[in-house]
Amino acid sequence: MGIWEHRGKVAVVGWGQSHMDRRWDGVALDRSCGGLSKEACLKAIADAGLSLDDIDGLITSPETRAEQTWAPRPYFDPPYDTEDGLTYASAEWMQRELGLKNVKYLKSDAPYIGPMMGLAAQAVGDGLCETVLVWYPMVNLEGRYGHNNPQNINQEAPGNSAFSLPWGYQSGAMFNNLVIFLQYCKKYGKSHDGLAPLCLNLRRNGLMTPWGYYALHEPYQLTLEDY
């Protein structure tokens, strides 16, 4: 495809991260998906040295809902009277909540975080907007993760899922990576031992996250022998 036509013309100038919880308690609306998304967006705008009036583009993704919905429970008062703001935070919702007056480009159905950043860069390069605010909202309601996914509540792993489901929620994506890694080992004469430093460091980093699973439930560092 050649060199990107907007190379050197687009930059990331600020970022923000909200508070994080393993679960939303369903009570504190400032800790809902919308509340935390607003927090992250305002931090990103401040970090970039911009004002709300500078924002003329909004891009976000619906990919992080994990099949979860708040209904059929009663909703809260506006703006938390629909799923928008509770289990996701659309571009239109963010525009209303932050009172953004100069937005001319909105996209609420962008893909997950990697392609979404590329889409944002393309939108700026193509002149659809000049200063775009991009956020990747995450939500995890009380109860089983992805509780509306039939596979996640099934007591069996039928069919092809027998080769992936018993090993965790992310095993589908990880299984593809393992096949590639196995081919790498065969081609270059390597072994699975080569992943040990990475695995040990990932665990070490995880233990530095106080709200993370391992910090809360298995607070010990893996050893090479464990791996």
Image (tube, rainbow, N blue to C red):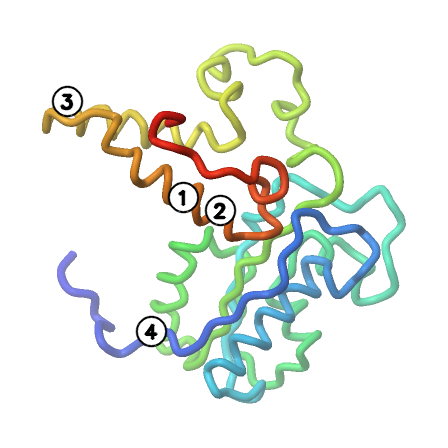
Q: CA distance from mark 3 to mark 2?
A: 30 Å
Observer-side mark, 4 or 3, equals 3
- At mark 2, the secondary structure is helix
In the rendered structure, which amino acid carries the disc numbered 3? Lys
Q: CA distance from mark 1 to mark 2?
A: 6 Å
Name the residue carrying label 1: 202
Name the residue carrying label 4: 126
Q: Position of residue 94 (x, y in %)?
A: 64, 70
The residue at 56%/40% (across/down) is 219
Name the residue carrying label 3: 186
- At mark 1, the secondary structure is helix
Q: Position of residue 148 (x, y in %)?
A: 69, 32
Q: Which of the pair 177/159 is nearer the observer?
A: 177
Observer-side mark, 2 or 4, equals 2
In the rendered structure, which amino acid carries the disc numbered 4? Asp
- Whether residue 163 sits left or right of residue 213 in the image: it is left
Name the residue carrying label 2: 206
Q: Which of the pair 199/132 is nearer the observer?
A: 199
Q: Is residue 189 at least partly visible in the picture?
A: yes
